[in-house]
Image (cartoon, rainbow, N blue to C red):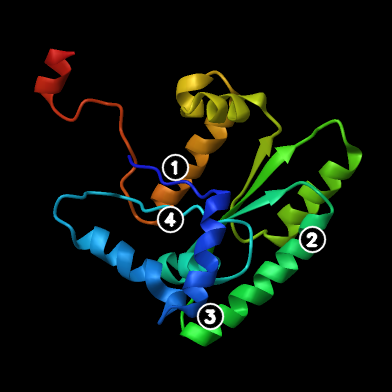
Amino acid sequence: MDVLPSNIDMTAAEPELTLARRGGVRLDSFLQHIEEDPDTDYDYLLVDALPNLGNLTDNSLHATQNILIPALAESTSKRTFELLSDYVDVLEGDYEITVNEVGVLINRIDVRKNRTQEIVDWINEAYDDIPVWDARERAAIQDALDNGSSVFECRPESDICEVFLEIAERLDHQFGFPEPTTEPESDSELLEA
């Protein structure tokens, strides 16, 4: 697994993409190159996009044509969902593509705030046709970021690991990957164990 996470430095690419020929679809050709390279063997190519609407987002949505929507459990999220929906509609029309919503991940749920549960309920109602996962506010994610490691490595006991595994399992199902098995596939594997 290789990871190239988004970061604030990517905003420097925005003006270059705006001026570039076919700037809204540059990532698409890059990902096609990776998929065609015989030395790479990825089941998934995940694109972590910055939370802004512009050429970086255009590239991400055009190249993947799928979106796992991250959302904060805050009242401002309602307007953010509206803006994202409008933006995706325009992008689909401009590029004649369909962007599939594969799920919503509600982040940093602070169970101490009453308003938080109202927002979580609203998101679940608004997106009742796709999976919605809840990720409570956890220090485990920040610990992993601070340590430069996976949350599975840094804090495997955290309940956030279960949420991430549920997302992976659901995406495997949605995209037609076989369900992983922990049972031996043959008698010889059973004897070796």
- Please name the residue that numbered disc 1 is placed on: 169
Q: Is residue 135 visible?
A: yes
Dot placed on the residue nearer the N-terminal end, 3 or 1: 3
**In this view of the protein, which residue sits in the foreground, 77 or 168?**
77
Q: Position of residue 156 (x, y in %)?
A: 50, 20
Dot placed on the residue nearer the N-terminal end, 2 or 4: 2
Task: Give the CA distance from mark 1 to mark 2.
Answer: 27 Å
Secondary structure state at the residue bearing disc 4: helix
Callout 2: 10 Å neighbours few (<14), some, many (20+)? some
* Type of amino acid at the residue the image marks with label 2: Lys
Question: Residue 78 shows which numbered tag?
Answer: 2
Residues tagged 3 and 2 counted as in contact (Cβ below 8 A): no
Callout 3: 10 Å neighbours few (<14), some, many (20+)? some
* Type of amino acid at the residue the image marks with label 4: Gln
For marks 3 and 1, give the one nearer the viewer: 3
* Type of amino acid at the residue the image marks with label 3: Glu
Task: Give the CA distance from mark 3 to mark 2.
Answer: 21 Å
Secondary structure state at the residue bearing disc 2: helix
* Type of amino acid at the residue the image marks with label 1: Glu
Task: Give the CA distance from mark 4 to mark 1.
Answer: 9 Å
- Please name the residue that numbered disc 3 is placed on: 92
Left or right of residue 141: residue 25:
left
Q: Is residue 92 above or below residue 54?
A: below
Q: Position of residue 19 (x, y in %)?
A: 48, 79
Task: Give the CA distance from mark 3 to mark 1.
Answer: 27 Å
- Please name the residue that numbered disc 4 is placed on: 174
**At 81% across and 32% down in the image, what residue appears?**
111
**At 74% across and 38% down in the image, what residue appears?**
109
Q: Quadrant of the C terminus?
A: top left
Dot placed on the residue nearer the N-terminal end, 4 or 1: 1
Q: Quadrant of the N terminus?
A: top left
